[in-house]
Amino acid sequence: MLALLRSQPGSALPPADAGQLAGELTEALHAAGATEVVTVPPAGEPDAATRIREAAGHARDAGEPLLICPDNLVAHPSLLWTLATEPAGRSTVLVMADPAGDLREDRGRIVPAASGAGTARFLGAMCLAPADLPILEKAADRPDLLAALLEDGLVPIATRPRTLRAQQVRTPAELASARKAVAAVDEDAARLRLAVKEQDDFFTTYAVSSWSPLVTKAAARLRLTPTGVTGLSVLFAVAAALAFWQASRPLMILGGILLYLGFVLDCVDGQLARYTRNFDAFGGWLDTMADRAKEYAVYAGLAAGAERMGLPYAWPLAITAIVLQTARHMTDTWYGALHDEAAAHPVQQSGGGVGARLTAASVKAQSQRGSLVYWAKRIVVFPIGERWALMAVLAAVTDGRVALAAVVGFGLLAAAYTLALRSLRALSMRVSVLHTVDTMRHRDDGPLVRLVLSRVGAGAPLPVAALFAVYALATVATFLAADPADRPWLLALAAVPVVLCGFPARNRHGGALDWLVPAALRAAEYLVVVAVGLYGAVPPAVVFLLLFMLALRHYDLTARMEKGAPAGGAGGALLGWDGRVLLLVLAALAGYATAGVAVLAAAVGVAFAVTAIKDWRASRTR
């Protein structure tokens, strides 16, 4: 990695102090991973822009980031290391909180602030990802480099000192004060505390992060890797699921304890990665996939334990929970992407719109961190910490059916709340996001849609996907109310919405609410699986298994996108949602529903495993 040490104009530091500081910064840049440090004259001098362009070109050709630091920065070296090791390899800038600043932090990203709306100030250091280096080459001759980069479309990640210290100095007095501030902070202890997420959920903040840094420190001393800690958390969650399956009171209590400890380790793996700066794309992918697999394994353990106790409706509750939670996660992913797109390409929003007012209220609540309103907004979305805590406590004191019923009930309330507010906000953003990626890949379209139906190009994507989900839900409700065998035509008619959803697959998914299309298709497909299970009297555990495998496939697509992992073979057109739905319907109508569900579960699971292992190995050989 190449680093630039930019000279700053207007410095009143004596040459000896300036030279010493430059030497310290050069050493810190090398410690952050720079193999070469190039000194750049102050902006405006003839050679300055040329050197920046040359360095950017070399870094771009090498496919490496470019680390830029001002020569008057007094800071803990860890901050430059943090800049150079952004987990997903994105561009990042060093900023500090400042109400009078000209920048604004939005979901961890830095964007220009309107007059009087600033929340942050730039501290001169940044690390630009290879993909953003052409923007730097274009803006190299601009005196305010960051402003030029932001104007040309850069949306960097914010790195803030928090408990560490950083300051640009221009006089001997400022230099002495900054050095004193840096020396007063235990850098290692501050780094350990910085490894904890600054804005986390209520349960995680007070019941986990208050002591998990001790575990993180111990894991670092034992030279455990974040992936190794992820593996331990999986073992704890699986052990909890097995304990819930046994359903005796002592084992239910033990299961609750194991589930809590597994969640602690689930937090520690990320903290360890941030503390040691040991990141890789597939490690982040594995963490996300493990989180979902652990939670759904616990659902199965709770349902199996309740069934062992003779309690009815436990498996239906587990099936409802996995369908609901997966659909919710799909909306979380794509709303987050939509929000980032809005930050990257701001548009003129209606100041009187409901969505704009809700967004402003949310920003205000986030600024009141620790207040009752802040925590209420964090809890009402029913995040993973609250879900796991609820399951652990209710399983220990009641039974698996009660725990699952609570997860479903609170999940429904959270889904209604988030869907309503996010939809209103999305309308006020007036941007779209799904069309910016491989749309058919993230829709999980199969050959039938890709090669045949999509060529019609008719219809709007979201309405037909939503109608498919509603039809599938109505079919499930009808089968629950009456004998499914009396209404085979309801199942047969599932082919109609498949065709309708396939027609607009190639159309631009640019509507304000089209980010909901993947979630709608996931919900529709999963509900068809449930309908087939009801129609063919498929054992609920087998239905759950297929839903589990489908969830892994769909999380694979979104996790790779979120964590910046290579797409590889994920999301290939093996059947796709359209082929799977038609296959299941035909198998059920032919009297082979159980066999169809079981075979499809095996096929999806094997395809997922083979693709994941292949891509994992490929990532290790790069």
Image (tube, helix red, strand yellow):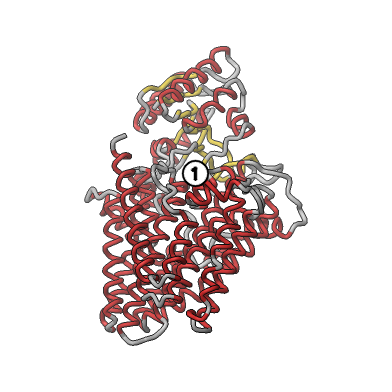
Residue 366, quarter of the rendered image:
bottom right
Task: Identify the image quadrant of the N terminus.
Answer: top left
Looking at this rendering, what residue extends furthest in the left direction?
A: 222
Q: At which x and y percent is residue 257?
A: 31, 72
Relative horizontal placement of residue 111, taking residue 404 as reference (left or right): right
Q: Can residue 321 be seen in the rendering of this structure?
A: no
Q: Residues within 10 Å of mark 1 (few under 14, many from 20)?
A: many
Residue under the image location 67 percent in, 59 percent down: 424
Image mark count = 1
Residue under the image location 51 percent in, 79 percent down: 479
Q: At which x and y percent is residue 215?
A: 29, 58
Q: Nearer the viewer, residue 479 or 466?
A: 479
Q: Can residue 488 be seen in the rendering of this structure?
A: yes
Residue 568, quarter of the rendered image:
top left
Relative horizontal placement of residue 108, taking residue 600 as reference (left or right): right
Tag 1 residue: 160
Q: Amino acid at mark 1?
A: Arg
Q: Quick one: SS at disc 1? A: loop
Q: Nearer the viewer, residue 81 or 137?
A: 137
Task: Identify the image quadrant of the C terminus.
Answer: top left
Q: Does 263 appear above or below 12?
A: below
Looking at this rendering, what residue extends furthest in the bottom direction?
A: 310
Looking at this rendering, what residue extends furthest in the right direction?
A: 352
Q: At which x and y percent is residue 116?
A: 70, 45
Q: Nearer the viewer, residue 210 or 163?
A: 210
Q: At which x and y percent is residue 128?
A: 49, 32
Residue under the image location 45 percent in, 65 percent down: 586
Residue 46, quarter of the rendered image:
top right
Relative horizontal placement of residue 539, taking residue 377 as reference (left or right): left
Residue under the image location 25 percent in, 50 percent down: 224
